[in-house]
Image: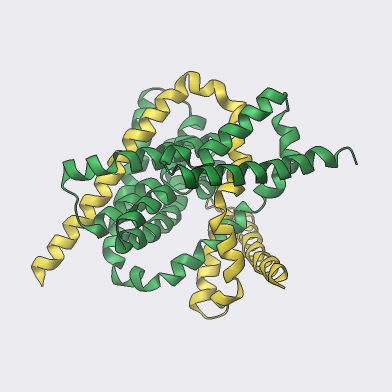
Amino acid sequence: MNEWLPALAALAGTVAVYQGTRWFYRRFPYPMTLPIVTGTITIVLFLLAMDISYSTYMSGGQWIEKLLGPAVVALALPLYKQRQTVKKYAFVLTAGVTAGAVAGVLSGYVPARWLGLDDELIATVLPKSVTTPVAMDIAQTTGGIPAVAAVFVMVAGIGGVVSASYVFALTGISQSLAKGIAFGAASHAIGTAKALENSELEGTAGSVAMTLSALFLSFITPLLTAIFFS
Amino acid sequence: MQTIRIVFHIAILFLFYYTGVWIQEAFQLMIPGSIIGMLLLLGCFSLNIVKPAWLEQGTSLLLSHMPLLFLPVTAGIIAHTSLFAGEGLWLVVIAYISTLLVLVTSGWTVQLLLKRGTRDE
């Protein structure tokens, strides 16, 4: 009985924090006020203030976490629904996502190795361009730290969205399809949401690119880390 | 009725997820089990074995509340805060610059291919 109480409190508390931060985001919609950012900060501060250990919190939190696997599986549905877009732009989509994924992994790996960081940290930063649950899964398989990987996913999402308009202007990237695919490949769901604000084609391209990028990186990241870390 | 339907939809997703995890473990694959499950479901959609309507509501519920699902994991950062006082800070910089490079590489690749495509026509 007494073991159930903290678990239930953690479960209810997480849902309440999520609802609160979602409401806050609707009123003040900026990348920095995304529920994942403010929600994580709220929970961490609460645990620290109340002196509750993470494992106590996870006795309840794990029940929410269990839904992450099925949620990744669920990404198949939007991708399937957009199969016309996938077919129509198959070549540019594949090329754009592949080029972006390779650029992302190499530009993450080379400077990190150069700075002499250890394998665990490098494996943690490499999957940053894909949506959080997939990034955490990739980090898990390659020996990284899932919770920290999520932080780099946020850096890629928020950093990309905040800087994209300058980057696109500076580099002459102006077509909707190109911008959408770039958003999806670099900044996953956060980038896709931004692309959707600009135009429908950009949003659809972003959402397809995001899922393809998640697929592609879950194949090449373990492969490359096996080579890099040997 | 609505709740039962959603639970059923999520149960189907769990089935694909655990099949994916099982395949990963059985064949010692490096690809996450969740991604294998997603590919299996995609395959079943294409072959008409599973109809999108069978899991529509459960799927959109999970996808629209994705941030809630990873809050417990991201709160795990609490055990790694010291990281961001040292080396981790460099990684934040690397992650940011690398993201800008991905934006440019993807965008340029697509734009270059589109331009070539129109010229050929």
- Looking at the picture, the colour scheme in use is by chain
Q: Residue furthest right?
A: A1
Residue nearest the viewer, comparing A174 with B50: A174
A201 sits to left or right of A219: left
A11 sits to left or right of B91: right
Q: How many marks?
A: 0
Would you say residue B28 is visible in this rendering?
yes
Image coordinates of residue A110 in percent, x first then y, are: 34, 32
User: Where the N terminus of chain A falls, by quadrant?
Assistant: top right
Q: Residue furthest bottom?
A: B48
Chain B's colour?
Answer: yellow
Q: Residue furthest front?
A: A27
A79 sits to left or right of A2: left
As drawn, A70 above or below B52: above
Q: Residue A106's quadrant in the figure?
A: top left
Image coordinates of residue A77 in percent, x first then y, are: 50, 67
Image coordinates of residue A7 in percent, x first then y, are: 78, 41
Q: Residue at x 36, y 62 (%)?
A: A204
Would you say residue A106 is visible in this rendering?
no
Residue nearest the viewer, comparing A220 with A134: A134
Q: Residue at x 19, y 50 (%)?
A: A173
Chain A's colour?
Answer: green
Q: Residue B97's quadrant in the figure?
A: top left
Q: Residue at x 34, y 55 (%)?
A: A197
Image coordinates of residue B74 in percent, x first then y, are: 58, 38
Q: Residue furthest top?
A: B86
Q: Residue at x 43, y 24 (%)?
A: B89
